[in-house]
Amino acid sequence: MDLQFQDCHDLDRLPWFEHNSEGRLVLRDPAAIGPVIDFHAHLGFAIFFSPPLDLNRRAPETLTNFPMRGVPVDLSVESGLNLETHRPGRVVQQYMRSMVTNRGDHATHTVPNLLSDMADMNIERAIVMAIDFPFGTQNSGAYLRAMQGQGALTPYIAINPLKPGWEARMDRLVDAGARGLKIHPYSEFMTSDHPLIIRMLRRWARTGLPVQFHTAFNALAPGFLQMLARMETYDKAIRSFPDTVFILGHAGMDFYDKAIEYANEYPNVYLEIDGQPPDNLRRIIDSVDHSRILFGSDWPFFPVALPLAKVLVATRGDRALRRRILYDNGAALLQRFGDMPSRQQAASAQ
C-alpha cells in the first residue's frame, strides 16, 4: 500500500476516507470503522503571559499544527518527524506566538472545533489534557470550565510542582472534576523521576486516578528537551506506584522498544500510540497485551485523520483488533474509573 500523500486531504485515496459536501475530510463509512475513543487531545494553550483564549468560540476551520494542506504526508514515519522534515520549526513558532497573543492557530483549538473534528472521524470520547508551566497563564482550570457539561470530553489536568501552592491547587482541580493527570517534562522543566515529580505523584495516588506521561522525543527535538524526556526516566514513577495506571503518551516515539519493555514488565502501563507509523504499530501489536494499547491523536498538533490512517493501515484485515485499539480498550479504562457507562448501562438508561 502506498503511504505517500500530497497532504492530509490526499488521504482520501485510502479506502477509509472521503470528502463531504463541505470539503471536509471524513470517514467514508463510519459504521464499518466503528466508534473511536481518542486518549490524547488538547485545547489551545495560553502560556506565559498571553491573554486567555476563548475556548468556547467556534472557528470556521481548525488550523492544526500539522497543516491539512501543503505538507506532504509520509505515513511510514513518526508524525512529528514528518512535520519537521517539511516545515522545520513550525511548532516552535506557534508556541512562541501563543506566549504573547490569543490569536493564531491556537485560537482555533476550541471545544466546538474539537467536537466538530471528532464527529468527522466518529470519535465518541476524547481525553483532553492540559499543560501548565510554573508561571503565567494556567490552562487546567480554563479547560475544566470550557468542558463543563460536555459529556464527550474527559479532562486531565496538569500540576506543576514548581508553582507554589500546587498541593491545594491539585485538590481544587480534582474537586472541580479532573479525571486524570498529565505530566509533560518539557513544561515541568524536569525529568519524571525528579523528587518533586515523585512527591506530586505520591499525593496524586490518593485520588486513584490515572496519569498520562508525555514520553521521549523524535530525532529532531532540541538536545535539552531530549534530556528531560529520556525513556529511562519513567521507570521510578511506574515502579513506585504500582496501583496507579500510567499511560505512556506517544508510546515512546522513536524509542517504542523501551515503551514495549515497560508495558511487558509493569501491568499498570498502557501505551497510547499517536504518531507511530504502521511498522512500529505492528511491532507494538506483536509484543504487547492488546488490551493495553490505546488510540490517540494529539489533536490539534495533528489532524485526527493522520494517526487514524496509520492504525487503519496497521490493522487492515483484522477488524476485531482494530476495534480493540480504537474503542474497546479506551472504553474499558474509562469504565474502570467510572468515566463512561458500559454499553449495558447505557442501554438500560434509555
Image: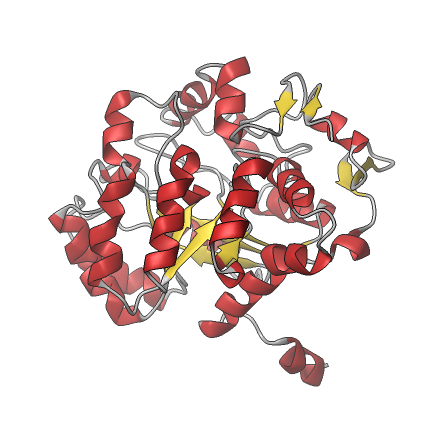
- Looking at this rendering, what residue extends furthest in the left direction? 195
- Looking at this rendering, what residue extends furthest in the right direction? 21
Name the residue located 32 percent from the left edge and 39 percent from the top edge: 137
How is the structure coloured here?
secondary structure
Residue 348, horizontal then vertical, whole percent: 69, 85
Residue 148, horizontal then vertical, whole percent: 51, 60
Quarter of the image where the N terminus is located: top right
Name the residue located 35 percent from the left edge and 43 percent from the top edge: 258
Residue 12, horizontal then vertical, whole percent: 79, 32
| Count of marks overlaid on the render | 0
Whether residue 130 can be seen here: no
Quarter of the image where the C terminus is located: bottom right
Whether residue 13 can be seen here: yes
Which quarter of the picture shows residue 252? top left
Which quarter of the picture shows residue 224? top left
Which quarter of the picture shows residue 253? top left
Task: Name the foreground residue: 20 vs 31.
Answer: 31
Question: Vertically, is 278 above or below 75?
Answer: below
Name the residue located 71 percent from the left edge and 54 percent from the top edge: 318
Side of 268 where 185 appears, left or right = left
Side of 339 where 187 appears, left or right = left
Residue 192, horizontal then vertical, whole percent: 23, 45
Question: Vertically, is 222 above or below 18?
Answer: above
- Looking at this rendering, what residue extends furthest in the bottom direction? 348
Question: Vertically, is 18 above or below 161?
Answer: above
Name the residue located 53 percent from the left edge and 22 percent from the top edge: 83
